[in-house]
Amino acid sequence: MSQKTRMAPKPDPQSVSTAADASAQVSMDPFFHILKLVPYSFLRPPRLRLKLPSFSLPSAMTVFSLILLTYFMVVSGFIYDVIVEPPGIGSTQDPATGAVRPIVFLPGRVNGQYIIEGLSSGFMFVLGGIGIVLLDLGLDKNRARSIKVSYSIAGISSIVIAYVMTTLFIRIKIPGYLG
């Protein structure tokens, strides 16, 4: 006698996972159930007609100015000035006369600065960057020749002044380093 034994069908893995998810969503906590239903049985949310705010993009000159200001603050050591709080300007006593003289650059220390030293160095770096921008404006083909020459001369002058002054600052800061 052979009886045919039927095997139970395998459960579908998707139906098992959805049943587990449904049981996880139902909370057994009665306090949570009360908090979920009671306030909304008599309270209704208001109908609000809110408009989304419209933002316009800033102009290119605004973005350039913000980036240039950020660059100035970074290269002038603004973060260092806030954390360390160095004096604005230093002073030393003249050995011959005994008079107190102001010092703008902190001599001999590469990793230290006075506030004025950082601001003046940062200004020279920004002046060199503006000189490069002016040189780029001098290459524009849609401008008159005299304006292109003016931009080029101003750009070259800015770069030369920034380079010479930065070199002078380094010679003051570290005597004997560049020559």
Image (cartoon, rainbow, N blue to C red):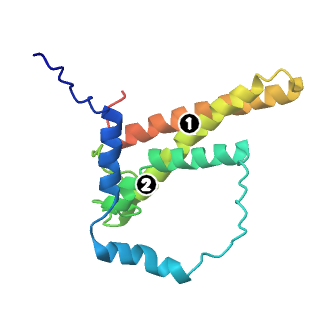
Question: Where is residue 93, by image quadrant?
Answer: bottom left
* Amino acid type for the residue under numbered disc 2: Phe
135 displayed left or right of 85? right
Estimate how packed mark 1 is, as few (under 14), some (14 to 19) or many (20 or more) residues with alpha carbons within 10 Å.
many
Q: Is residue 91 visible?
A: no
Question: The N terminus is located in which quarter?
Answer: top left
Q: Residue 121's spot in the image, x, y percent?
A: 48, 45
Residue 162 is labelled as: 1
For label 2, the SS is helix
Q: Residue at x 68, y 72 (%)?
A: 47
* Amino acid type for the residue under numbered disc 1: Ala
For label 1, the SS is helix
Read off the residue under disc 2: 78
Work out which residue is located at the far left of the displayed protein and give it: 1
11 displayed left or right of 115? left
Question: In front: 97, or 111?
Answer: 111
Question: The C terminus is located in which quarter?
Answer: top left
Q: Residue 57's spot in the image, x, y percent?
A: 71, 47
The alpha-carbon separation of the residues under discs 2 and 1 comes to: 20 Å
Tell which circle, 2 or 1, labels the residue nearer the N-terminal end.
2
Relative vertical location of residue 6 with respect to residue 38 in this rendering, above or below: above
Work out which residue is located at the far top of the displayed protein and give it: 2
Q: Residue 51's spot in the image, x, y percent?
A: 73, 63
Relative vertical location of residue 54 with respect to residue 151 in this rendering, above or below: below
